[in-house]
Image (spheres, grey):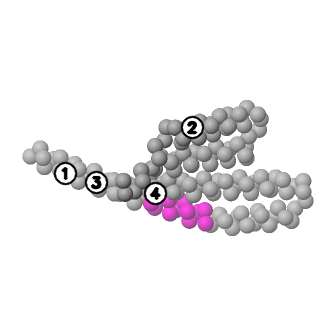
Amino acid sequence: MNDNKEYNFKKIESIISKLIIWIEILLALLIVLTIALSIKDLIVLGITVFRTEAISSYEILQVFLSHTLLLVVGLELAIMLISHTPGKLLEVILYAIARKMLISSTNMADILLGVIALAIIFFIDKYLHTKDVKKGL
């Protein structure tokens, strides 16, 4: 009877795991769909940069870069949801920090903290992160 309870528990656990994976795939698809729809905004911003005077185009270019990097972070997040590897998590964090540094750093302390954070991520990737196991081994 105890084996029957354990079997039922494993069966329920398997069903829940599969449901979670399908929800993650659905969320990844929604992220990709939203990003695809946002490309229109990038095109409009790119055209606006060329039509505006040099002084005003700086701000528009900054918005363009911010929007582009946010879409890249979103794409990396979608990949991370599907692949479930530590390397993808490090890439998402790397792009998020790079975006923060490039777009909204207001002083040298922000830039210094960003550089330190990037150095930590590269250290983790090189020395602590075991690379994804090669298929076939």
Residue 121 x, y percent position in the rendering: 58, 40
- Which residue corresponds to mark 4? 82
Q: Secondary structure at mark 4?
A: helix
Rounded to the nearest angstrom, the CA distance separating label 1 from label 2 is 44 Å
* Sequence order check, earlier mark of 4 and 1: 1
- Which residue corresponds to mark 3? 14
- Which residue corresponds to mark 1? 8
> Outermost residue, front direction?
137
Q: Which of these two is toward me, 129 or 90?
A: 129
Q: Secondary structure at mark 1?
A: helix
Q: Residue at x 11, y 44 (%)?
A: 2
* Sequence order check, earlier mark of 4 and 3: 3
Q: Residue at x 19, y 51 (%)?
A: 8
**The residue stretch that appears in magenta:** 25-36
Q: Secondary structure at mark 2?
A: helix
Left or right, 82 with respect to 15, comes to right
Mark 4: few/some/many CA within 10 Å (<14, 14-19, 20+) = some
Rounded to the nearest angstrom, the CA distance separating label 1 from label 3 is 10 Å
Mark 1: few/some/many CA within 10 Å (<14, 14-19, 20+) = few
As drawn, the label of residue 123 is: 2
Q: Which of these two is toward me, 91 or 52?
A: 91
Amino acid type, residue under disc 4 in the picture: Ile
* Sequence order check, earlier mark of 2 and 4: 4
User: Contact (CB < 8 A) between labels 4 and 1?
Assistant: no
Residue 75 x, y percent position in the rendering: 57, 58
